[in-house]
Image (cartoon, grey):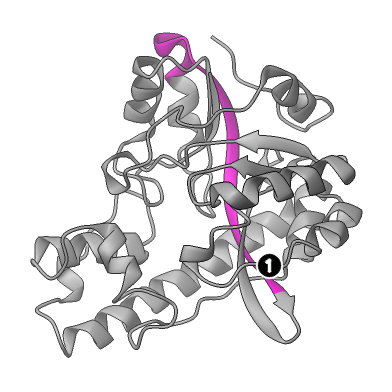
Amino acid sequence: MIDLHTHSSCSDGTQTPTELMASAREAGLICVGLTDHDTVAGWQEAARAVSDTGVSLVRGMEVTSHYDDAGARVSVHMLAYLFDPTAPALAAHRERLQASRADRARQIVERLSEDFPLSWDDVVAGEGAVVGRPHIADALIAAGVVSSREEAFDDLLHPRGKYYVPNYSPDVFDVISWINDAGGRAVFAHPMAAKRGKTVPLSALDAMAEAGLFGVEVNHRDNPPHLREALASRARVLELFQFGSSDYHGAGKPNRLGENTTDSDTLAALEQGAFLEVVHP
């Protein structure tokens, strides 16, 4: 039971890193990956909980990026594992994105406030977390505008909606390079998640593999079942490691810890030669 894609309140999850580790134990996991969006703020707290929970920890981060598809920007989330957090390129990315994300969130709230009973003071994020769309969704739920984060993202916060404000995001090939230069491993998160918006063509995996992509998330609830075999087949041809993950956000999403898992051989390959080691009890 290895689940390498989860989020805490340091980004858009609803549990602190300590609570997340405890939930991982309760779910029967032997290893969990903390991959908050564009931040490593939860690493130390989660690592301190390893000995108490008996659950091993893979330190990671979900990096916001984009793929240029014939002039159209397609959002790509790249999981970075076991990298040097002080590496200059990734550190600069975190700083720039946090500043951009805070400004973007205010703009979205301003647009929404014209039509709904919502103000900036209504939006709350966890300690050290930068306000993002999930936090705005929570405020919309509290105001009775929507009933769930999913409803908010399907309508008011959707990229094609009138309240949406684009965010800074670097090119995915730069991100893969930054992760590798930092001694980490790059894994493409939920590549077929069409309900989130436009997805990259399957052929893009070839170029990403050539650029140093380590693996791809195949078993993820947002990858439609009928597309997973084609994704897995392409991964095998390109000799990319295949991952399965929950993308757990606590109460923020219906995803459950351990609903998809990664095998121990893949975890061992992920750790081999990486800058960081897995934190074991």
Q: Which residue is mark 1?
A: 200
Question: In the rendering, at what x and y percent does residue 168 appear?
Answer: 56, 75
Helix, strand or loop for disc 1 = loop
* Residue range highlighted in magenta: 49-67
Q: Nearer the viewer, residue 84 or 12?
A: 12
Question: In the rendering, at what x and y percent does residue 265 appear?
Answer: 75, 19
**Is residue 201 found inside the magenta-colored segment of the image?**
no
Main SS class of the magenta portion in the image: strand
Q: Residue furthest right?
A: 210
Q: Nearer the viewer, residue 205 or 12?
A: 205
The amino acid marked with disc number 1 is Val
Residue 252 vs 102, above or below: the answer is: above
**Identity of the residue drawn at 54% across and 36% down:** 245
Question: In the rendering, at what x and y percent does residue 122 appear?
Answer: 15, 67
The quarter of the picture where residue 217 lies is top right
Residue 245 vs 124, above or below: the answer is: above
Question: In the rendering, at what x and y percent does residue 209 appear?
Answer: 86, 52
**Identity of the residue drawn at 35% across and 45% down:** 13
